[in-house]
Image (cartoon, grey):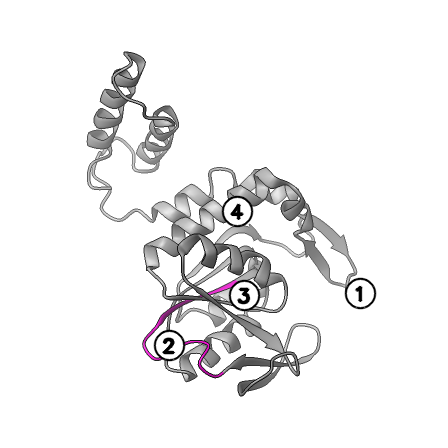
Amino acid sequence: LNSIDGYRNKISHFSLGFAKGKYFVPHWNKMLVVLDRLQNCFGQSSQAKEVNIYTYLSSLSAMDLKNSIRSIKDFPKKGVYYRDLNPIYLNPEAFKEVINKLLAFAKSKSPNKIVSIESSGFIIGSVLAKELGIGFAPIRKYGKLPFEVLRAHFPSDFRDTTLEIQLGAVKKNEKVIICDDLIATGGTAKVAAEMVEELGAKIVGIAAIAELDYLKGRELLKQHELFTLIKFKKQNEI
């Protein structure tokens, strides 16, 4: 945003026109609130040279979404806090909020394909692909895909894993977003990105609902832009 004040004046104009019956422009008042909060981020100066609007907007109701996540101690093994995202999927308003925020990020990257990792990543990735009007390519566990595949074996968070993607699922020079439900150590997303790149495509972003900040997955993925809506700073954070 080059001029927050300029956008506020334009929105105020349309909002006034709407009140007089001249326009049908919903949600302008909400936009004014957003701009006021952006203004507070940058003090009294109306010049905001570099604003990651997608990261900012993701924080507006991140706390509500975070409170929807169920934290389960000692699952799937002792000492682990499992972050259960199913309550978000069960709540249509929360699910819609998640999709809209991830969609805003994805649109900014103009991808040709969404690639998601089995299996929770399919829930988000397939919806994003449908909304964007682009293809969806699944990365699955060993033995689940027919046809010729590219295969990668690696130690994952809880057990050794072999992942596969069909040859031709992504094409050379296509722009791809990797989508998953949660980023923990970042190992699975890193391997998925390497598989996509080996097929000749370019990773333009990695997106997920939640991120376990204490496991340092962002550091492992530092060569890619990682966008997440919710962060857990500590392992025992509930």
Nearer-N-terminus badge (4/1):
1
Q: State the mark number for residue 216.
A: 3
User: Of the residues shown, which amino acid type is indicated by label 2?
Assistant: Ala
Mark 2, mark 1: which one is toward the viewer? 2
User: Of the residues shown, which amino acid type is indicated by label 3?
Assistant: Lys
Do labels 2 and 4 touch, CB within 8 Å? no
Mark 4, mark 1: which one is toward the viewer? 4
Residue that mark 2 sits on: 201
Q: CA distance from mark 2 to mark 4?
A: 26 Å
| Residue 12 located left or right of residue 187 | left
Tell me if mark 1 has few (under 14), some (14-19) or many (20+) residues whose alpha carbon lies within 10 angstroms of its own: few
Secondary structure beneath dot 1 equals: loop
Q: CA distance from mark 4 to mark 1?
A: 30 Å
Residue that mark 1 sits on: 78
User: Of the residues shown, which amino acid type is indicated by label 1?
Assistant: Lys
Tell me if mark 4 has few (under 14), some (14-19) or many (20+) residues whose alpha carbon lies within 10 angstroms of its own: many
Secondary structure beneath dot 4 equals: helix
Q: Residue at x 33, y 54 (%)?
A: 108
Q: CA distance from mark 2 to mark 1?
A: 39 Å
